Image (cartoon, grey):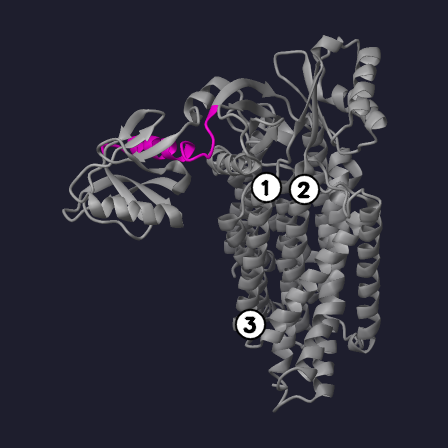
């Protein structure tokens, strides 16, 4: 590459970085303030609208309440994936939607969830909204090429049978759809519909189709609801959480860049510039796609940064290996990028598969995490394979051609990792067993195997008028510690009702004596009048159905990853050992939660998903090297040759595993060091998971593959 061309490329890249950095800075400066150019924040970071509905039906069953909460959760996810829906008392449901300040506008758009009936022409009800599983607006092209606006309905098994009977007996007739006594659609039956999927046509605009779909969705609730009250609530963490997180991220990024430059010289400089571009792109993408950012979302971004660095480390290690064989720097760069491609693609695609499944099947926090993770994966691959490549070539073209600027791989004596496999297995089993024992002990003490927080088990909500407005920081510093001292609960959520002097405090379920003690403290310490204090039980914000969604999503994504690894490596033992290593990581982190009694709340799922994504990516890189080295073995390898290949592959990739773990750990550690209490509680198990993920990739996954390769199935 000519020096003039290299100079043009560097100027273009630096100009792009400057432009993106400026644009991202505007977005960040607006975020949390509520200005137009800002990333929407979740309830934990910015607050939002709280709407409480009263169930009209008398004595609603627990099953109907749970079903209604779940369906309402799905309905309001149209506003944000980070909404919260939970039961209050026996017959009320509260919906909290982040990033919104106009409760009336939400109520007007959301509507008043009521009854939905599918009737025959004589008014006989043959099906209700309970049988509708989804209603979506869409478009289709008819036989004449004209665009038609439609609503597509999906029915459950019972609804499919009822709808098939009604449409079969009324072909050519009309079957009205009635919402709260009013006919909202009068579709004509063109043919018998027996497959459980139907289309309603005849809308003149997409907005009309969307309005009908919305009415059908909110009318498919098991119970009829009416608005009881609505308000705008403040953030649970406050501006300090955002400021400290941004500061931690900035310091962490600088430290990672310094580390990369020290370790890799010129390639490290290229990686640092690419990482800066990556970070700016993530911020811009979150804003452009209007993705709600919460504490779990930050975990997805951190994982993305770790994977962005990881891709660069893989490339640089390959370049150094080629330089060590005597090739020129330019030739080594070309070969290095080519050889690193398979490991980068396999690792990222495996994690991307998990993100797509989580986004499709998960709900709430799981879906929000999947969005940020997917963005991070795509952008990390782009910056590593495109941006870093051009920066490196440009720096080379500008005169940095001496191999001392790039380094060369050092010949290392092969470490006998497999010889210590029983030590590794025993250590892991002891840690996991210790966690299981701790969970058993806590279960016998009636404290629960894990320290489940409000998000999982619900609790008590206490609302009081404090007589003056408190800032979130004042609530965190003055009110929350006192409540924690009285209740013995460290998982307290407190926020203010905007425009009033009321504060809502959510704690674990309190006994009558504990409620009286809390009320007494509020009166004595803050001058709260007893008549303004109300307490009521609330359900978990993560419903049983949402937990089932998360479990199914993780299970399906795990199976998909297994199939992909099996396909790519032509050996199911690679996939099986990677999945067992993932289970190992989950159990170890559960042990950390159990022993340290860390609150298992909304961030727990995100923490586990982060560890799974990080660990599988780490493992795939090592497996890619094993696959490459196996290709050099002539004939069917013996057990000794397999051990040699595995040990050599682990030795060759150990520096990459360590360096990637360090850079990702730096980001999380800065969050732990500088974050507020709730963020530190989130970062601690995440750090444990990152260490465990790196350990399992090096000391568990490959050893398991070897054992299965030698002892199970044909050695081929």
Residue placed under numbered mark 2 in the picture: 603
Query: Is 401 placed above or below 304 here?
Result: below
Residue 690 lies in the magenta-colored region: no
In-front residue for pair 454/648: 454
Indicate the position of residue 190 as horizontal and vertical percent values: 18, 45
Mark 1–mark 2 CB contact (< 8 Å): yes
How busy is the neighbourhood of tag 1: few (under 14 within 10 Å), some, or many (20 plus)?
many
Q: Earlier in the sequence, mark 3 or mark 1?
A: 1
Q: Residue furthest bottom?
A: 635
Check residue 566 in the rendering and tell me which mark sits there, or answer none: 3
Query: Is 348 placed above or below 672 here?
Result: below
Residue at 36 percent of width and 25 percent of height: 180
Residue at 29 percent of width and 30 percent of height: 208
Residue at 83 percent of width and 46 percent of height: 596
Q: Earlier in the sequence, mark 2 or mark 3?
A: 3
Indicate the position of residue 6 as horizontal and vertical percent values: 53, 55
Q: Secondary structure at mark 3?
A: helix
Q: Secondary structure at mark 1?
A: helix
Residue placed under numbered mark 1 in the picture: 365
- In this rendering, position of residue 177 left or right of residue 3: left
Quarter of the image with the C terminus in it: bottom right
């Amino acid at each position: 590459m000519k020096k003039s061309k290299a100079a043009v490329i560097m100027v273009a890249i630096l100009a792009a970085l400057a432009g993106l950095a400026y644009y991202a800075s505007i977005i960040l400066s607006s975020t949390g303030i509520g200005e137009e150019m800002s990333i929407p924040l979740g309830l934990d970071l910015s607050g939002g609208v709280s709407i409480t509905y009263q169930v009209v039906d008398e004595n609603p069953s627990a099953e109907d309440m749970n079903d209604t909460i779940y369906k309402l959760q799905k309905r309001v996810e149209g506003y944000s994936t980070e909404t919260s829906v939970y039961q209050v008392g026996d017959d009320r449901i509260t919906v909290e939607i982040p990033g919104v300040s106009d409760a009336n506008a939400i109520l007007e758009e959301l509507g008043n969830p009521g009854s939905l009936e599918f009737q025959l022409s004589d008014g006989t009800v043959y099906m209700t909204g309970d049988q509708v599983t989804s209603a979506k607006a869409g478009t289709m092209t008819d036989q004449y090429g004209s665009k038609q606006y439609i609503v597509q309905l999906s029915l459950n098994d019972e609804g499919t049978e009822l709808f098939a009977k009604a449409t079969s007996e009324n072909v050519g007739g009309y079957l009205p759809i009635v919402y709260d006594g009013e006919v909202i659609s009068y579709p004509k039956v063109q043919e018998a519909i027996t497959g459980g999927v139907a289309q309603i046509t005849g809308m003149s605009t997409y907005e009309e189709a969307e309005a009908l779909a919305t009415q059908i969705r909110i009318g498919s609730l098991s119970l009829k609801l009416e608005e009881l009250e609505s308000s705008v609530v403040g953030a649970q963490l406050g501006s300090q959480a955002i400021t400290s997180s941004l500061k931690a991220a900035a310091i962490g990024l600088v430290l990672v860049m310094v580390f990369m430059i020290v370790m890799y010289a010129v390639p490290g400089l290229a990686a640092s510039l690419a990482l800066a571009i990556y970070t700016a792109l993530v911020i811009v993408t979150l804003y452009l796609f209007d993705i709600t950012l919460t504490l779990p979302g930050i975990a997805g971004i951190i994982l993305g940064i770790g994977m962005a660095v990881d891709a660069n480390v893989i490339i640089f290690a390959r370049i150094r290996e080629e330089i060590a064989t005597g090739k020129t720097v330019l030739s080594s760069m070309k070969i290095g990028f080519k050889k690193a491609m398979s490991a980068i693609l396999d690792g990222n695609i495996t994690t991307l598969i998990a993100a797509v499944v989580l986004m499709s099947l998960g709900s709430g926090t799981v879906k929000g995490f999947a969005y940020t993770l997917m963005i991070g994966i795509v952008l990390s691959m782009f910056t590593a394979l495109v941006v870093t490549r051009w920066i490196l070539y440009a720096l080379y073209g500008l005169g940095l051609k001496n191999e001392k600027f790039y380094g060369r791989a050092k010949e290392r004596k092969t470490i006998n990792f497999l010889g210590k496999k029983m030590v590794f297995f025993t250590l892991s089993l002891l840690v996991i067993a210790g966690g299981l024992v701790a969970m058993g002990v806590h279960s016998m003490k009636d404290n629960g195997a894990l320290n489940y927080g409000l998000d999982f088990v619900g609790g008590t909500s206490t609302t009081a008028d404090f007589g003056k407005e408190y800032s979130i920081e004042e609530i965190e510093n003055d009110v929350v510690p006192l409540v924690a001292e009285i209740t013995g609960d460290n998982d307290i959520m407190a926020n203010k009702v905007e425009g009033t002097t009321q504060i809502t405090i959510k704690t674990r379920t309190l006994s009558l004596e504990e409620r009286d003690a809390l009320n007494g403290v509020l009166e004595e310490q803050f001058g709260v009048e007893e008549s303004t204090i109300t307490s009521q039980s609330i359900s978990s914000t993560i419903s049983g159905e949402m937990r089932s969604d998360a479990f199914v999503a993780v299970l399906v994504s795990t199976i998909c990853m297994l199939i992909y690894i099996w396909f790519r490596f032509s050996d199911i033992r690679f996939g099986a050992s990677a999945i067992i290593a993932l289970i190992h990581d989950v159990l170890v982190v559960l042990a950390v939660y159990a022993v340290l009694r860390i609150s298992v709340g909304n961030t727990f799922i995100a923490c586990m998903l982060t560890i799974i994504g990080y660990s599988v990516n780490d493992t795939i890189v090592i497996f890619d090297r094993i696959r490459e080295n196996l290709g050099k073995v002539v004939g069917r390898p013996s057990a000794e040759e397999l051990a040699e290949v595995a040990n050599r592959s682990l030795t060759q990739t150990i520096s990459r595993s360590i360096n990637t773990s360090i850079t990702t750990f730096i980001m999380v550690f800065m969050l732990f060091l500088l974050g507020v209490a709730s963020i530190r509680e989130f970062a601690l198990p995440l750090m444990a998971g990152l260490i465990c993920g790196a350990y399992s990739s090096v000391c568990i996954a490959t050893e398991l593959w070897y054992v299965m390769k030698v002892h199970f199935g044909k050695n081929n």
